Image: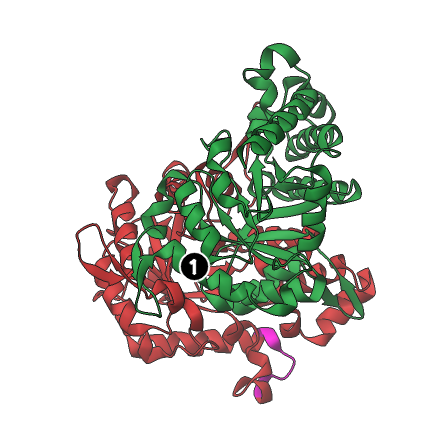
Chain colours: A green, B red
């Protein structure tokens, strides 16, 4: 899957991932009203609004980008109906040829992580049948529980040709509270916790059976665009890992912050933007030009983001 | 909710939580066969088997215990149908008067954590309606992203009278990989990461609006029974937090390991057992006596666990 991702990035010249995080406030009134007329102010109504919104965005941008990253929390808050919209979105994007990164940030003790890994990357066996639940292509994984919480995901990567991005340094303001603490590593050297997690990611990524033909592993990492200096250090620590970079745009990361995340060959990183694309129509410079044409605004925002990254790396 | 939990513990004399983690291998053949006859070897079939299994266990033990802890991963792996079984289980347990701890281990950046918190503890606003998705009473939270990832859950605790248990020291073998690393705290003192997280939990728990009439906060912690010495230190560091203790039974924790987690008044901790109860019928000493009567075996295992804890604390 990492090879497919790299080839899709090369083909589109866009190391970009559109975050499908449809907060209700991002969805235009007329989309919501139509859904509510049909289903009322119910979970079904909210889920229908999300689905119609996502579909229009995907239809407008799918030819420009390699991948999307639906954030499952935005669906989970609408319960079963919301998760049906997540499921439908994953399948629709895959039909459109997009690679789907499920932003699920799961992680638990071994046997439980195995269930999460089955849910998002693998299959379950029911009697004589093998069935897939959500079936994303990649998912994000929380490392706080250590190796036995991550290994079940790696196992599914190997079995089903999938990939993961392990949280190393997240993009949010308080990520440093624990992640930046100085710790003593196995080698006796002191380093911030995120570097220690980065070294562990490199260890996991070094299994040759996980390495694709472009030299990158199925085990990648999440490092926030909001911390470019840490990104540079982590790029060196994890040479085999693709870095998923959230925090570009709305969270404050800019094009010039992105260079350190990429390798010399222009590979090695994929940058996510969520509200900067899907809610572009609500803000300058798109609001005036596109008004309610949110899908067209999203397309223009992707083109602008692509240009910004091209000029920066 | 923390007051309701404490009063339910006092009433049942059982600081016990039954983990509803229905792995397919725990479910008796006849339960599965019946479900598969009805729905085939499908996700619906698996979900029906899980639901029937859970219902029988709950019916057999609900009068003995204050709370249950369904592990959402075990449901999520069966997709939408599995999550419907999770939802049905949560509601059924609440109807039976049980307090439901959703073991979801969610955690993300602020706006995303807010969506998870709404999904599991709070409500969403859809047009003019306020609706709840899964509506557990408590949920577990992963702290790796720091305060802004945890605060949205605390906000829902305050708004809806719910509670959380933050992962501090997990019960699995590799939990020490990151959690046990020596770090430098704000006070310049060196301590293991889990203690630093524990201090943060104590800070969050110290908000007086979150404190119930028994002196405990809505913000609790998860500390594994498999690490009793760390439990003793964390008990001191987090005096206002209830500790949810997984790892008893199948994972190796025994009654005598539990004393350090409790306060002198016998409060302060609630011990979870999952397979030790729900799959008791498969193992000695229950297998011979109960054979396929899995619900009766679960009841006996709860009674034995209650006795083991009573003698130990």
| Residue B72, picture quadrant | bottom right
Q: Nearer the viewer, residue B138 or A225?
A: A225
Q: Which residue is depicted at the point 50% across and 62% down?
A: A202
Residue A68 in the image: x percent, y percent?
65, 40
Residue at label 1? A197
One can see residue B293 in this view: yes
Residue A195 shown in magenta: no
Q: Residue A301: horizontal and vertical position, in percent?
A: 62, 25
Does dot 1 land on a helix, a strand or a loop?
A: helix
Image quadrant holding the C terminus of chain B, namely: bottom left
Q: Is residue A86 above or below residue A256?
A: below
Q: Residue at x 79, y 43 (%)?
A: A95
Percent from the top left, x then y, of residue B9?
A: 36, 61
Category of crowding for the residue at label 1, using alpha-carbon neighbours closer than 10 angstroms: few (below 14), some (14–19), many (at least 20): many
- Which range of residues does the magenta coloring cover? B289-295
Residue closest to the far top: A288
Q: Is residue B21 visible?
A: no
Q: Position of residue A165 (x, y in %)?
A: 56, 53
Q: Nearer the viewer, residue B44 or A53?
A: A53
Residue B47, relative to residue A78: is it above or below? below
Residue at 66% x, 69% y is B24
């Amino acid at each position: 899957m990492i090879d497919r991702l790299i080839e899709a990035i090369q083909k589109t010249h866009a190391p970009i991932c559109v975050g499908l995080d449809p907060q209700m406030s991002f969805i235009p009134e007329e989309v919501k009203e139509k859904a509510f007329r049909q289903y009322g102010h119910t979970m079904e109504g909210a889920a229908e609004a999300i689905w119609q919104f996502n579909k229009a965005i995907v239809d407008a941008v799918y030819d420009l980008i390699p991948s999307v990253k639906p954030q499952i929390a935005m669906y989970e808050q609408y319960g079963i109906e919301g998760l049906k919209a997540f499921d439908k979105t994953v399948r629709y994007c895959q039909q459109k040829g997009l690679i789907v990164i499920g932003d699920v940030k799961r992680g638990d003790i071994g046997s439980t992580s195995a269930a999460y890994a089955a849910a998002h990357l693998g299959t379950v066996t029911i009697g004589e049948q093998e069935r897939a639940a959500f079936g994303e292509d990649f998912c994000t994984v929380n490392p706080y529980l250590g190796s036995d919480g991550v290994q079940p995901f790696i196992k599914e990567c190997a079995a089903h040709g999938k990939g993961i991005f392990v949280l190393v340094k997240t993009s949010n303001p308080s990520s440093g509270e624990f992640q930046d603490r100085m710790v003593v590593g196995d080698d006796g050297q002191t380093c911030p916790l995120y570097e220690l997690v980065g070294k562990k990611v490199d260890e996991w990524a070094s299994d040759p059976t996980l390495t694709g033909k472009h030299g990158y592993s199925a085990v990648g990492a999440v490092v926030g665009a909001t911390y470019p200096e840490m990104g540079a250090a982590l790029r060196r620590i994890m040479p085999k890992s693709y870095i998923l970079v959230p925090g570009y745009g709305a969270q404050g990361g800019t094009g010039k912050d992105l260079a350190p995340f990429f390798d010399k060959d222009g590979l090695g990183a994929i940058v996510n933007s969520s509200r900067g694309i899907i809610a572009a129509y609500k803000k300058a410079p798109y609001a005036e030009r596109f008004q309610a044409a949110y899908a067209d605004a999203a397309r223009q925002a992707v083109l602008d983001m692509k240009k910004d990254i091209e000029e920066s790396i």
